[in-house]
Each structure stands twice: as C-alpha cells, then as structure tokens.
Amino acid sequence: MINQTYDVVVIGGGVAGAASLYALASFTDLKRVALVEKYPRVASVNSKATNNSQTIHCGDIETNYTLEKALKVRRSAQMLVRYAEQLPPRLRDQIIHRFPKMVLGVGVQECEFLQQRYETFKPHFTGMHLLDKTQIADIEPSVVNVNGHDRPEELVAIAVPDEYTAINYGTLAQSFVEQAQSVAGKTVDLKLGHAVQIIEPVGSNYRITTSAGSMMARFVVVSAGGHSLLFAHRMGIGLNYSCLPIAGNFYFTPQVLNGKVYTVQNDKLPFAAIHGDPDITLPGRTRFGPTALPLPLLERNNLQTLVDYLEVLKLDRTVIGVLWDLFKVRDIRNYIFKNMAFEVPLLDRHLFLKDARKIVPSLQLEDLEFAEGVGGVRPQLIDRTQCKLILGQAEIDPGNGIRFNITPSPGATTCLGNAEQDLLRIQQHLGCNFDRTWFEAERVPVSQSAWARS
Ligand SMILES: Cc1cc2nc3c(=O)[nH]c(=O)nc-3n(C[C@H](O)[C@H](O)[C@H](O)COP(=O)(O)OP(=O)(O)OC[C@H]3O[C@@H](n4cnc5c(N)ncnc54)[C@H](O)[C@@H]3O)c2cc1C
C-alpha cells in the first residue's frame, strides 16, 4: 500500500543522509521530506562513533591530500564546526571536541617532506605550526620519551594545537535529524526500521518499497554507503563502477596521547598509515588504527551483506585486471599481506605493535588490546572504464531525479558539503528555492596557541 508522497526521500540514516535531511528541511522551501533507515537507530553503521576515526579532516595533517583537496575538505569541515557551535553548549559538547593534532615525521626523509609541506600549506592554514622534538614532547611526551630519554630518530611534526579536531558522527547525525524535525510548518518524517527493497521509476516520480510499506518521492537521494551502488546497479545505473570494501580495525591502549597523532602516508596507499588518538567515547583510553584490509562485506559486522558485496563487486576480467594491477605494486602487496596477518590471532598484536611504536615507542605488547566490535568498512569504488581504484568519494547522478552518494573517508567530514551538492541538484530538478547563504559563510578557525614557539 502506498501511503505517502514526499518531495524528497533520503535513503540511509548515516551522517550523510541525516545531513541531507537537515539541509532540505532548513534551507529549502520543500514541505515534505523523509529519511528512511533500515536499522532502529540512525548512524548504526560507519557513522557510529566507534566505527570511524572520529576526526574532522581538514587536510592539514592528512599528507595524502593535495593543497587543492585540503582546501575543499576544510570548507566542509568548517561547516561541521559552524553547525555544532550554533547548538546549545550541552549539545555542542556531545558532538565536537578540542584536542591538539599533529602529523609526525620520523627519520630524515619524512622530516624533510613535512618541512616542505609546511611551507606550502602554512599560508592557507594559519593555525599550523612546525614543531621540533622538544616542542613535540611538550604536547605529546610519549611520542618522544622512551625510558626517560628522547628517542634517537629525527622528529618533526606539523601541529594544530587548538581547534575542534574530534567529532562524534553518531550524535551529529542524531542532532541533524532533531534539528530537521524541529523546523515549523514542514513534514519531516523519520522512518526507522524500514529496509528499502526496491526503488523504481513511476512516471516522473519514484516508488520506494520498504520492509514496512511503500512511499512515493519526486526526488530520491540514496546515501546508503556501499548499498548505494547496489541500488544504482539494480536500476541499471552506475554499471561502470564496482565496489571494493576496505575494513578498518582498531586497538586500544591505556591513555598515552593527549591528542591526535597522525603519521605520514605512503602515496601508493593513501589511507594506510595508522594514527593514535583519544577515543571520545571511552575517556582514559587511546585508540590506534585503523588497519586496512579488503573484506567481502558491505557492513563490517553484518554477514548478510556478503551477498550484496558479491553483487556490487561485479567480478569479471576488468575488475580482476584492476585488482591484479594493484597487487603488482610491491608496497600495496606487502601492505595487504601485513593486514591479513593482523587478522591472525597471536600474530596480530605483535605486528601491530611495530606500527604503533612509530607513534609511541615505549608501547609494550600487554598495552595493546584488539578493539572488539569497533571499526567499519570503506566502500571504495573501482572505475571499470578507466580500470582504476577511486580513492575518494563518488556520486552517481543520472540527472533524472535520483542521486546515489558513496562516501568512504572523508565522507563524514564532508557530509554538509555533500548535502549542499544534493540540494543544488534537487533545486535544479524540482525548481524549489534553496537558500545557500549558510553554506557560503566561510569561517577560518582561529588558533590560540599559547605554547607555540614558532
Ligand atoms: C575505519 C574508518 C575510519 C574512518 N574515519 C573517518 C574520519 O575520521 N573522518 C571522516 O570524515 N570519515 C571517516 N571515515 C569515513 C566515514 O565513516 C564515512 O564516510 C561516513 O560514515 C559515511 O556516512 P554514510 O552516511 O554515507 O554511511 P553510513 O554511516 O554507513 O550509513 C549508511 C546508512 O544506510 C543504511 N542503509 C543501507 N542499506 C539500506 C537499505 N536497504 N534501506 C535503508 N537503509 C539502508 C545503513 O543502515 C546506514 O545507516 C572512516 C571510515 C572507516 C571505515
């Protein structure tokens, strides 16, 4: 039975879908919108606080970002902070958190790389400081000290000492929904426990059939992680993409860090270098990770998504060719083997310890505890036409009133920036009004570094 017709239905109640719902309710004159989520709560998958790295990515300490990408991501990151700061302080403090952050260079080569990067980025990121070993120790003593002495390697860090750097994407998603539902004079429906089964065009609209009834929509935004691609494929759209899910696990230690400490990324493996940081859901613990291992599931802890994975992988000669090309690169091959070994009991902690000691050299095996049930899956896409792995996010927009967002990292940071893009397309298609003023209010965070010596 079809019981409702909406202007826009958003499928997927992660932070991406919730941000689009918030933006639709707050900044357009559309009167009827809905968010459809298969689980009983929003943000139950990758946007759940425990399942990602809880980082507001700005590109300043992510060495795999070019300056151009960093500036783009930072614009979205600023929107998150601006959104949270306009909430009452009690709510704001459940969402964003201030910690120092840095990217650490270890050894001559990485230190030279960071020094050069600092020169390029500093004019654009005014809160950034280049730190020597002593200055690093002032913020993060455990990164430098081993048994009362400084570690021997050369160390340099690019640091941002006083900005909002950590975020609970779960409470953020929940807050987006609450804010959307508080807009007067609109119908903003949240349909939890509704697993979407079929999306099909009916005239110029779409019928969405879920496990708990159907609805019609004039425009559909699908933000269902790797499942976005599955829905697209089932409609004969986006067939030039396959999905390669990359799982990320974490390890806990006692508190050894005061803030976020990232490490220099390998250009061939952009999300592979681990970091350590305080876990905002578990005060008193430090979390190291994530690992990165191809996993045949679209959701980390849902074995039923194996079948969905096989459908979106679309394994054929092209995909095998791309995977083989990746495997032929020595760094990637070794990295895959290493991450497979991370999954072998007993061996896992020994191997991970080696990586974690790059950040905190005094860590011992007994300090490390595998973070059970923590971590998620990044739905990376393979472009079958260009025969290559896409490392960022993607949207598939055939231009006929439906849009599919597939958002691996930094897709949570960019949720409001992506919502802005959704709204531009919706405005174009439905002819509604979209007040973009809020999105365009640029605001560069101010650094108040009392300690900085540079
Ligand atoms: C280990 C790891 C670390 C990360 N760290 C960061 C970080 O620090 N910063 C950052 O910006 N990004 C990070 N990311 C990426 C970030 O987690 C994602 O970009 C973000 O959570 C994506 O949000 P989403 O709403 O698109 O997806 P999800 O949060 O996965 O939500 C998709 C939703 O769609 C729903 N859904 C699926 N199928 C259906 C259906 N049939 N019917 C109804 N609903 C459906 C799901 O239940 C789910 O709620 C990380 C990712 C991983 C794996």
Image (cartoon, rainbow, N blue to C red):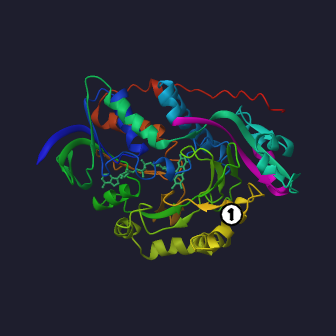
Q: Is residue 151 magenta?
A: no
Instruction: Please give the residue where the numbered disc 1 appears in the rendered image.
Output: 366
Report which quarter residue 17 is drawn in. top left
- Across and down, in percent, residue 270 comes to 62, 57
In reply to whether residue 107 is colored magenta, the answer given is yes
Number of marks present in the image shown: 1
Nearest the viewer among 38 and 59 is: 38
**Residue under the point 63% across and 29% down:** 445
Tell me where residue 364 sits by quadrant: bottom right
Looking at the picture, does residue 188 appear above or below residue 326? above
Whether residue 83 can be seen here: no
- Say which of 253 and 73 sits in front: 253
Give left or right: position of 180 versus 248: left
Can residue 362 be spotted in the picture? yes
- Image height of 267 relative to 404, above or below: below
Q: Which part of the image, by quadrant, shows the C terminus?
A: top right
- The residue segment tinted magenta is 95-117
Q: Position of residue 252 (x, y in %)?
A: 61, 56
Note whether ligand 1 is within 8 Å of mark 1: no
On screen, residue 92 above or below 222: above
Point out residue 317 in the picture as x, y percentages from the top left corner. 45, 77
Q: Nearer the viewer, residue 199 or 349?
A: 349
Query: Where in the figure is residue 293, as x and y percent of width and height?
Result: 55, 66
Q: Is residue 107 above or below residue 415?
A: below
As shown in the figure, which amino acid type bears the numbered disc 1? Glu
Disc 1 packing (10 Å; few <14; some 14–19; many ≥20) = few
Horizontal side, residue 371 vs residue 423: left or right:
right
Q: Residue at x 47, y 30 (%)?
A: 91
Residue at image coords 36%, 57%? 227
Report helix, strand or loop for mark 1.
helix
Q: Front-most of 395 and 276?
A: 276
